Image (tube, helix red, strand yellow):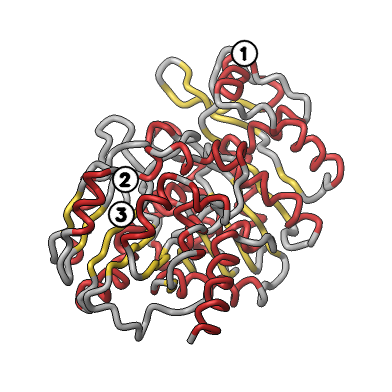
């Protein structure tokens, strides 16, 4: 990859792809953790101080987490505060209004364009169902509209490196390309972890967005990257269903409404093939008469939603974490935003913080929940990435890295 460091940018129009997708409070629709925004500042500062005319493209939310799909005016405000420089915002991704704003940029000025996920070609369901190559993406509205306006494309979005979307892999086909400071930092850090892992290695997988967990699970089990996988959150619920447990109609409908029942067969396959390496919850927590109630698997009510792991599960998982030499964690153990169901998430993070093993965590809700319950300095490496981190560590190729390497080969030959 070509680093941005040292590149002259004065007077150049720079298209900067960031990942500043943040956890959002479901009630206020306000940002609750701005870690990714903070980590984008070094690249932005370099461009602004170097006299670049910078337009930022970024996303917030998706079809899989529609409750987080909001306009990005607050993101611009946060960037403004952290950078100490005006970051203009326009609620238009690449239409006529956005293009006029880009053309009018002066040296050192910055504009944040509208939410990329407003465009069908940028949502995850489009990527999954249509499967365009980077060359085919040159015909997308985003690329056709923006590419002719810029002199340089900079990507600083390692946390979205697993996304094969036009904003991530297509502009490299047309524009000179460079990697931002954060992309370089995270890629190098994870390379050093990936090739120096100590055993036993424990993966702790939770949260509500489980497609990433299931996407990498088979690889890390087959390659013996993960000696143990501890399942919590919705991932744990799916594995309990795969074991034949009846969790009731409410849980079934919850998963069905979110198209998550498709993962039950996968979970059953992994349980049959790796029975000693996957740990599932032994008890769960639900609400009963306005209070937290922990219930063993044999006594689960059939008319409840299960919002956290129970104390028995927490104790068992904490012991496994304690003996690990390396820990990868992605996703909270329960609905930690509700004090009634924060115990599992709190306990897991406490166990990881106290472990002597080398710990790596990543992802928006992961970092947000860890920040709430522990001193994040107790974690050895905090990555802005969630799915990209896990997939990279499992040995899967990342579309962004391939696109950046291809652009590097082209630009190097042209130099």
In the image, which disc is placed on residue 249? 1
Neighbor class of circle 3 (other Cα within 10 Å; few <14, some 14-19, many 20+) is some
Q: Residue at x 56, y 65 (%)?
A: 403
Q: 311 left or right of 63?
A: right
| Residue 372 visible somewhere in the drawing | no
Q: Nearer the viewer, mark 3 or mark 2?
A: 2
Neighbor class of circle 2 (other Cα within 10 Å; few <14, some 14-19, many 20+) is many
In the image, which disc is placed on residue 93? 2
Q: Are marks 1 and 3 in contact (CB under 8 Å)?
A: no
SS category of the residue bearing label 3? loop
Q: CA distance from mark 1 to mark 2?
A: 41 Å
Q: Residue at x 32, y 47 (%)?
A: 94
In the image, which disc is placed on residue 45? none
**Which badge, 1 or 3, comes first in the chain's sequence?**
3
SS category of the residue bearing label 1? helix
Q: Which residue is mark 3?
A: 34
Q: Are marks 1 and 2 in contact (CB under 8 Å)?
A: no
SS category of the residue bearing label 2? loop
Q: Are marks 3 and 2 in contact (CB under 8 Å)?
A: no
**Which badge, 1 or 2, comes first in the chain's sequence?**
2
Q: Position of residue 144 (x, y in %)?
A: 41, 51
Q: Position of residue 171 (x, y in %)?
A: 46, 61
Q: Quadrant of residue 13?
A: bottom left
Q: Residue at x 50, y 35 (%)?
A: 64
């Amino acid at each position: 990859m070509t680093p941005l460091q040292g590149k002259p940018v004065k007077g150049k129009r720079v298209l900067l792809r960031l990942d500043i997708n943040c956890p959002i409070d479901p009630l206020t629709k306000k940002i609750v953790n701005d870690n990714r925004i903070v980590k984008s500042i070094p690249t932005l500062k370099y461009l602004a101080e170097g006299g670049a005319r910078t337009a930022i493209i970024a996303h917030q939310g998706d079809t899989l987490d529609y409750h987080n799909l909001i306009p990005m005016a607050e993101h611009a405000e946060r960037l403004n505060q952290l950078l100490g420089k005006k970051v203009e915002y326009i609620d238009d991704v690449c239409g006529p209004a956005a293009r006029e704003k880009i053309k009018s940029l002066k040296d050192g000025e910055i504009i944040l364009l509208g939410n990329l996920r407003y465009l069908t070609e940028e949502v995850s369901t489009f990527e999954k169902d249509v499967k365009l190559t980077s060359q085919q993406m040159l015909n997308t509205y985003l690329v056709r509209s923006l590419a002719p306006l810029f002199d340089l494309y900079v990507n600083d979005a390692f946390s979205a490196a697993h996304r094969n979307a036009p904003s991530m892999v297509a502009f490299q086909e047309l524009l000179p390309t460079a990697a931002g400071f954060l992309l370089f930092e995270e890629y190098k850090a994870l390379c050093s972890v990936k090739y120096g892992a100590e055993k036993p290695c424990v993966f702790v997988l939770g949260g509500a967005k489980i497609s990433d967990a299931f996407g990498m699970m088979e690889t890390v089990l087959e390659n013996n990257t993960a000696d143990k996988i501890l399942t919590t959150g919705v991932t744990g619920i799916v594995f309990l269903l795969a074991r034949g447990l009846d969790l009731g109609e409410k849980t079934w409908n919850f998963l069905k409404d979110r198209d998550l029942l498709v993962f039950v067969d996968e979970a059953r396959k992994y349980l049959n093939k790796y029975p000693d390496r996957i740990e599932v919850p032994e008890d769960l927590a639900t609400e009963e008469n306005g209070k937290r109630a922990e219930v063993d698997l044999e006594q689960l009510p059939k008319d409840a939603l299960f919002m956290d792991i129970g104390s028995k599960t927490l104790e068992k998982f904490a012991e496994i974490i304690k003996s690990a030499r390396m820990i990868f964690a992605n996703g909270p153990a329960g609905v930690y935003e509700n004090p009634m169901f924060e115990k599992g998430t709190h306990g897991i993070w406490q166990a990881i913080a106290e472990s002597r093993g080398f710990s790596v965590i990543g992802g928006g809700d992961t970092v947000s929940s860890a920040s709430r319950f522990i001193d994040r300095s107790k974690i050895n490496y905090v990555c802005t990435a969630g799915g990209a981190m896990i997939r990279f560590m499992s040995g899967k190729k990342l579309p962004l890295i391939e696109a950046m390497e291809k652009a590097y080969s082209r630009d190097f030959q042209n130099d």
